[in-house]
Image (spheres, rainbow, N blue to C red):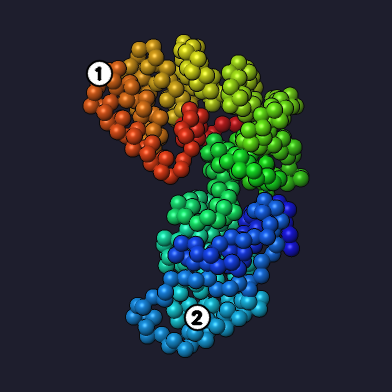
Amino acid sequence: MSETSFIKKSALGIRCLIVSLLHRGAVLGLLGCLAIACSASVLGQWRRPRASAKPPAVMPPSTNKEQTATPAQDFDTLATQASAAREGDRIDEAITLYTKALTLRPQWAEGWWYLATLYYDHDNYKEAAEAFKQTAQIQQKAGAPWAMLGLCEFQLARYDEALLHIQQGRQLGLGDNGELVRVMRYHEGLLSILKGNFEVAQQTLSALSYAGLKSEDLIIALGLASLRIGMTPKQVDINYRDRDLVRRAGLAQHFAAQKNMSDAQREYDMLARDYGKVANVQYAYGLFMMTNRDDELALAAFEREIQNWPKHTLARCQIANIKLRNKDIEGGLKYAEEAVKMAPRLPLAHYLLGRLLLEVGQSERAIQELEEAAQMVPSEPKIFFALARAYNKANRKQDAQRARETFTKLSQSAQTEGQSSVLPDDNSLTDKSQP
């Protein structure tokens, strides 16, 4: 059975992924033989997996008192029967046998993993999540069970937990399994969209486009992120009213992410022409023009967004940012002041206003705005870099030193975790409540 979309049943064909990784037997951390060997690309055809997988190599069995007292013959018999049932596609029987074996040996990581994959193969994501969780707790340094737990939680709409566990799995490491990494990153992008972290989502999904991946669902997801619409590609089906709008925005951003600027320019131009008054279209166009280093057209696009949607604070912030970069400090102050008044809980507005105030010599007021932004986003290194400058100008040497140390620490942490470079319009500094 094949699937032509990037994600079938919101799982990206992960069933095929599980069976493929078990068929090969390359070591993946402590979990063992979990290398990816799909016959098709992650973005291409996915076949329905069979539950006949060669057992992976795992860590030696635990020797705790409970396990030592277990009748080895009974456990070995059940384990052998469970493996035979799984390889024979007798899924219900295999589930029953694995459950009985795990009752005798609860620390059997291989058994929990196979039980989890069988539940997943049956679309029983609740039971699969519990079994993957048991595997992850036994082999805490292996990334794959945490990542798979996150995918199950995504299916169950437990989005906060899903994002946490997918990121945990990626940070622990998935070996050299590029396909699995891409699956995880794609779901991170979707979860960021659902949480309203549109800039982070766009960065995450654009990285997949840059890597050469392309699918209808990826393009739709990029469109949702660009237009700041909190939905999943599955919801944007052929009956969705604005599907063409979302798809065209996603295609434009897909080309931009691939550094195909001529095609991106053409698509964005047509998008702005055909949907010029739709919320966030001009804003997305302006962001692209900034990427394409055309500040004049970017400013015009942001102005049009404000004309269409007078309360659009992010468009004001981007205008302030461009004017700051071009040393038009007075012009930028106007927009930054408006943004702060309209959205006092918007960190980006306080950050930009602080930067602009610093340029006109209002150090104390600049410090107040930057400190406000730092309280909202204590993990953002760029804010502390600006604070160090502001403290220096106010002759607050000790505060400046502490701000520099914080900046260095946060920057090193971001580099270690592979986070994207900090930009003024990064999600950590922006508002999630835009139209």
Asked if residue 197 is positioned above or below residue 47 in the image, the reply reads above
Secondary structure state at the residue bearing disc 2: helix
Q: Nearer the viewer, residue 60 or 92?
A: 60
Query: What residue does disc 1 label?
Result: 395
* Label pair 1/2, CB-CB below 8 angstroms: no
- The dot on residue 101 is 2
Q: Residue at x 52, y 77 (%)?
A: 99
Q: Residue at x 72, y 35 (%)?
A: 248
Q: Quadrant of residue 230?
A: top right
Q: Nearer the viewer, residue 362 or 306?
A: 362
Q: How many marks?
A: 2
Give, as a three-letter code, the residue at label 1.
Asn
Is residue 193 in view?
no
Q: Quadrant of residue 53?
A: bottom right
Is residue 295 in view?
yes
Distance CA(mark 1)–CA(mark 2): 69 Å
Asked if residue 189 is positioned above or below residue 271 in the image, the reply reads below
Q: Residue at x 54, y 26 (%)?
A: 314
Tell whether 403 sits left or right of 140.
Answer: left
The quarter of the image holding the N terminus is bottom right
Tell whether 328 sits left or right of 91.
Answer: left
- The dot on residue 334 is none
Where does residue 141 sit, x and y in percent of width and height? 42, 60
Q: Residue at x 37, y 83 (%)?
A: 68
Tell whether 374 sits left or right of 97.
Answer: left
Count residues near mark 2 (Cα–Cα under 10 Å), then give few for <14, some for 14-19, many for 20+.
many
Secondary structure state at the residue bearing disc 1: loop
Asked if residue 411 is positioned above or below residue 277 in the image, the reply reads below
Give, as a three-letter code, the residue at label 2.
Ala
Where does residue 435 sit, x and y in percent of width and height? 60, 31
Q: Please report whichever mark, 1 or 2, sits nearer to the chain's N-terminal start.
A: 2
Where does residue 226 sit, x and y in percent of width and height? 62, 34
